[in-house]
Image (tube, helix red, strand yellow):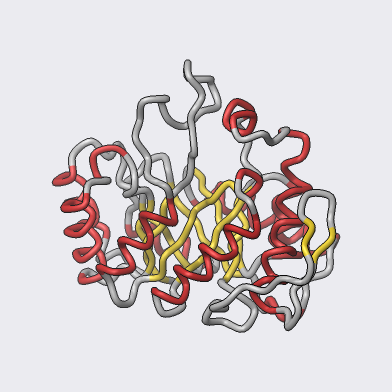
Amino acid sequence: MELGVYGLSAKATLGPADTARLARRAEEWGYRSWWVGDHVVLPSPRVPDSPMAPTDPILDPLVHLSFVAALTERMELGTGILILPQRNPVVLAKQAASLDVLSGGRLLLGVAPGYLEPEMAAVGVRVAERGGRTDEYLDAMRQLWSAPEPEFHGRYADFARVDAHPRPVRPDGPRIMIGGHSPAAYRRAVARGHGWIGNGRGPQDLVRHLDGLRKAEAEVPRPAHLGRLEINFMQIDPVETGPDDARRYAELGVDRLLVYPLPLEDPADVEAFLQRHADLPR
């Protein structure tokens, strides 16, 4: 099991000096991946389902990860997650390939359909379309990353007689991590993702998610080229992860355990949190 860091593109940790210091410290302390979330806009006034207040600052994930890529050498760079239906898939394929090339193939592209209706409405996406768009966009981007003559004809994406270079470092594009805790998300992870990413309040929640993924494996086929489904998990309550829980996560087969140093109000507290968790058993 590897350790990853989550969420440091928001609130008090998003400035360039703090990002540079924390990213270098994380790599020095043995963290193997650096993950960030995504909100183009936030509902104002805040709605019950919104994880952030409308005035909470959060950087664009790919811009932030490009900055971190230039500061580090080994850490994988993950979106956990990027709200895929809100992005143009042709533009995103170019952005993701560019970051992957500049980082030496370190991009982990985590995606999910999203759920905040005001945010989707602001970019012209209907909530009812988010699942279909997610599936189509993944297929369209893979065409641009790997097909000799990219072509895609769907309801939400349509192109032919175009190409896009440079291609990502991996022949089939960046590794795709599918986020979510619904039966549809589990099926999407099995059918379309190299891995799954989720969160919960402890190992007991992960057990429930793993059961959902096993059920999905019985319902949809998994393409052989995707390999074994990787498991990425973040404990959110309590935010402190103890050694016993870390050992349990490893026993359950977690590939990357992500720590999230909430409340992100003081960069010094975040740094101390990362140092405390760097020696968790794996």
Q: Give percent across and percent down for residue 240.
A: 32, 47
Q: Give percent across and percent down for residue 137.
A: 71, 57
Residue at the farthest top position: 45
Q: Give percent across and percent down for residue 169.
A: 52, 81
Q: Give percent across and percent down for residue 73.
A: 29, 76
Question: Residue 125's image quarter?
Answer: top right
Q: Which image quarter is the C terminus in?
A: bottom left
Q: Which image quarter is the N terminus in?
A: bottom left
Is any part of residue 230 visible from this angle? yes
Instruction: Tell me what residue is drawn at x 30 percent, y 46 percent.
Output: 261
Is any part of residue 190 visible from this angle? no
Instruction: Tell me what residue is drawn at x 42 percent, y 43 percent.
Output: 236
Locate residue 147 relative to residue 114 in the image: left or right: right
Locate residue 132 relative to residue 8 in the image: left or right: right
Is 242 situated above or below 141? above
Is 77 situated above or below 181? below
